[in-house]
Image (spheres, rainbow, N blue to C red):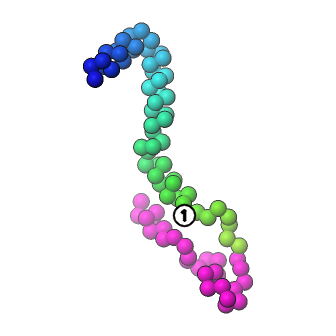
């Protein structure tokens, strides 16, 4: 550990601009994995359909198709209301 700290101090003393750019790059790579925004956007994207649901005329033979486009069906979005 002392060797790493010594190396970082030496690199900062010799080339502070390169060290600062490396730190900014490292933060840019790590931040999306620890950000809560990433978690919630992943949750939202998993529940939004890829295509817009087109109303289908139900003749009674399609039990999984809602009778009306506004009828609630699919995943529960209670977690989103409680944010």
Residue 71, quarter of picture = bottom right
Residue 8, quarter of picture = top left
Q: Main secondary structure of the magenta part?
A: loop
Q: In this view, does 9 lie above or below 35?
A: above
Tell me if 60 is positioned left or right of 42 in this view: right
Residue 41 painted magenta: no
Tell me the quarter of the image containing the N terminus: top left
Badge 1 density bin: few <14, some 14–19, many ≥20, Cα 10 Å: few
Tell me if 38 is positioned left or right of 49 in this view: left
**Residue at the far top in the pictured view:** 14
Q: In this view, does 8 lie above or below 45?
A: above
Q: In this view, does 38 lie above or below 1?
A: below
Tell me if 18 is positioned left or right of 56 in this view: left
Q: How many labels does the image show?
A: 1
Q: Mark 1 points at which residue?
A: 47
For image coordinates 71% across by 89% down, the residue present is 59
Q: What stretch is highlighted in magenta?
A: 55-83
Residue 67 percent across, percent down from the top left: 64, 84
**Residue toward you, 21 or 64:** 64
Tell me the quarter of the image containing the C terminus: bottom left
For image coordinates 71% across by 73% down, the residue present is 54
Residue 57, quarter of picture = bottom right
Residue 71 painted magenta: yes
């Amino acid at each position: 550990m002392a060797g790493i700290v010594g190396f970082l101090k030496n690199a900062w003393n010799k080339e502070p601009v390169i060290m600062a750019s490396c730190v900014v790059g490292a933060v840019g790579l790590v931040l999306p994995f620890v950000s809560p925004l990433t978690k919630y956007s992943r949750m939202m994207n998993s529940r939004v359909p890829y295509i817009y649901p087109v109303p289908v005329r139900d003749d009674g033979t399609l039990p999984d198709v809602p009778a009306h486009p506004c009828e609630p069906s699919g995943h529960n979005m209670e977690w989103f209301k409680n944010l």
